[in-house]
Image (spheres, helix red, strand yellow):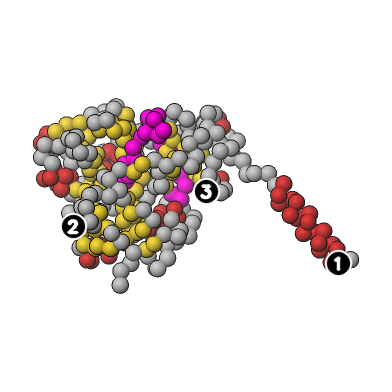
Amino acid sequence: MKRMLATLAIIVGTAATAQAPVEEAPRFWNVEWPDTDFANNAIQSWTEVMSGGPPKDGIPAIDDPQFIRVGDEDRIGGREPVIAVEIEGEIPRAYPIRYLTWHEIVNDTVGNVPVAVTFCPLCNSGITFDRRVDGQVLSFGVSGKLRNSDMIMYDRETQSWWQQAIGEGIVGEMTGVELTSLPTWMESWDEFRTRNPDGIVMAQPTGFNRAYGANPYVRYDSSARPFLFSGEMPPHDIPPLVRVVRVGDRAWPMTRLAAEGEVVEAGIRLTWNAGQASALDQRSIADSKDVGTVRVFDAETGENLPHDVMFAFAYHAFWPDGDWMLGS
């Protein structure tokens, strides 16, 4: 009898599990996102998604940015970080982090390439994406939501949600679609303008009351734990807010690159040079500690490679089985 009851319990339990309803997204989200298909998603649990504070578009993305010549720019400190976008045949462009900190996304077109230049302060993740998907050009905004402390973007055309760190649709019609990352990088303003005296730089946005040049996350990259993150900490006793250079599913700790200056392995050449200020240290970005500039190249061809400089906790969250390139 006991064996029969046990068998029955297993059968009933299995049936209950098989018939358990799929977890639904919080219904109040439908008020803010009436055109988003929440039934189509890659979210394991909706508890992964948190509000970052501001609502949808509370952090306003920049569309149609204006530019000025490098020689006419006098606001940016020499050590302040910028994202350099250098597409062959086009005038090199710099997108200052002093503006991206407050707007997080810039929708732009460089030559014939529509791009989204993105920066998530909570992950230190600065990636540039091609905005074309299957012949359609998307434009991106800031959802106000976070997952693993990383910004969730959305596209205005389908109202789908996109994870910035991985460049992939996670909710809605575009779930599972991957954006193409472009080989851009973060460097100091001095480095950019020295290399590109005839280049252009994004002008200060108008119409917004923002403290451009100030860091609203003072001492964040010296914190013991990341903001709004409850996931697993990185392995190998790596502090969660140490910067790592991610290339594909591999990550090189910035501490190693700073110590060695140059690393060549796995077909990739990485270089480190001092001179770039942290965007997440002092209140004034220009006066913040030096974190250095990393460049990433194909070791054989010398071509720039797509990469990201992000915090270790975020890398481990999105690439839990990734390769940590720790050296000997």
Q: Which mark is residue 2?
A: 1
Q: Secondary structure at mark 1?
A: helix
Q: Whole-percent x and y of residue 120?
A: 36, 45
Q: Which mark is residue 273?
A: 2
Drawn side of residue 30 relative to residue 13, left or right: left
Of label 2 and label 1, which has the lower sequence position? 1
Q: Residue at x 34, y 43 (%)?
A: 181
Q: In the image shown, does 175 or 70 lie closer to the viewer?
A: 175
Q: Secondary structure at mark 2?
A: strand
Q: Which mark is residue 48?
A: 3
Q: Whole-percent x and y of residue 185?
A: 25, 47
Q: Secondary structure at mark 3?
A: helix
Between the C-alphas of marks 3 and 2, the distance is 36 Å
| Magenta stretch, residue numbers | 126-149
Q: Residue at x 39, y 62 (%)?
A: 323
Q: Residue at x 46, y 50 (%)?
A: 148
Is residue 129 part of the magenta span, yes or no? yes
Residue furthest right as drawn: 1
Between the C-alphas of marks 1 and 3, the distance is 41 Å
Q: In the image shown, does 239 or 127 lie closer to the viewer?
A: 127
Q: Quick one: label 1, few (<14), some, or many (20+) residues within 10 Å?
A: few
Q: Quick one: label 3, few (<14), some, or many (20+) residues within 10 Å?
A: some
Classify 57 as above or below 215: above
Q: Which mark is residue 283?
A: none
Amino acid at dot 3: Glu
